[in-house]
Amino acid sequence: MELMTRTTLHLFCSAAPPVFDVAQVIEQAQAGGWDVCLGLTPDAARWLEPSLDGLAVLTGHPVRFAYDRPGEPEIWPPADAVLFAPVTFNSLNAWALGLTSSFVVGAAAEAIGRGVPTVAVPCVNAAFARHPQFERSVEALRSAGVSVLYGYGENGLAPHESVQGQGRGGQGQEQAGAYPWGAALDVVGAQVAAGRS
């Protein structure tokens, strides 16, 4: 969805394979009128380390993956919307439980309290999705006003089967190509537009 005026999107990403698409997603969002600020979990920042300077140039803002030190000025404009995608099992559960040890989880938690339109797109395998805390976390975020695009519906992302040896995050490489970036940006745009009408 294209916006009528320049609007600030805080794009937060966890360490899952779709994060490697983030430069194209930023360009897509910018083409739709968003001013994008990129925040990463520490693991996602490690994955993208060779690209961090280029991503800062692309967005025109520093890429953030740690909290500011006390007294440091705010370096981003305030968010008109937040998109947390991909959000892993770990980050989603921490967010729902209010465990804000990472910058992006803390900022996403604060966005709920500020009433900022927020969309999340989990990227988890079926084994993680069967853990009882996962569904509780999805429901907790939805009840707090977060649009969680997850499940088997039109805008959702269904869990995929895990592959042995995928590492701590349990995200499969095959999932990256199917990730619904376009739907996520459309939902964020629609929420901002609805808030202005």
Image (cartoon, helix red, strand yellow):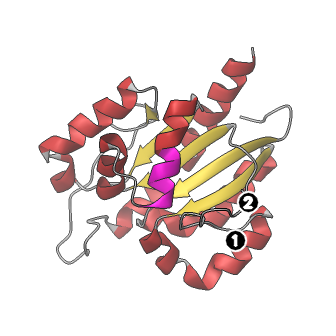
The three-letter code of the residue at mark 1 reads Leu
Q: Position of residue 132 (x, y in %)?
A: 13, 42
Q: Residue at x 51, y 65 (%)?
A: 19
Q: Is residue 151 above or below residue 171?
A: above
Magenta residues span: 102-108
Q: Residue furthest right?
A: 5
* Labelled pair 2, 1 in contact (Cβ < 8 Å): no
| Rendered image quadrant of residue 117 | top right
Element under disc 2: loop
| Rendered image quadrant of residue 61 | bottom right
Q: Position of residue 161 (x, y in %)?
A: 21, 58
Q: Residue at x 58, y 60 (%)?
A: 39
Q: Is residue 45 magenta?
A: no
Label 1 CA crowd tier, 10 Å (few <14, some 14–19, many 20+): many
| Rendered image quadrant of residue 115 | top right
Task: From the image, tell me which residue sits under label 1.
Answer: 55
How far apart marks 2 and 1 lie (CA) works out to: 21 Å
Task: From the image, tell me which residue sits under label 2.
Answer: 73
Main SS class of the magenta portion in the image: helix
Q: Residue at x 61, y 66 (%)?
A: 64
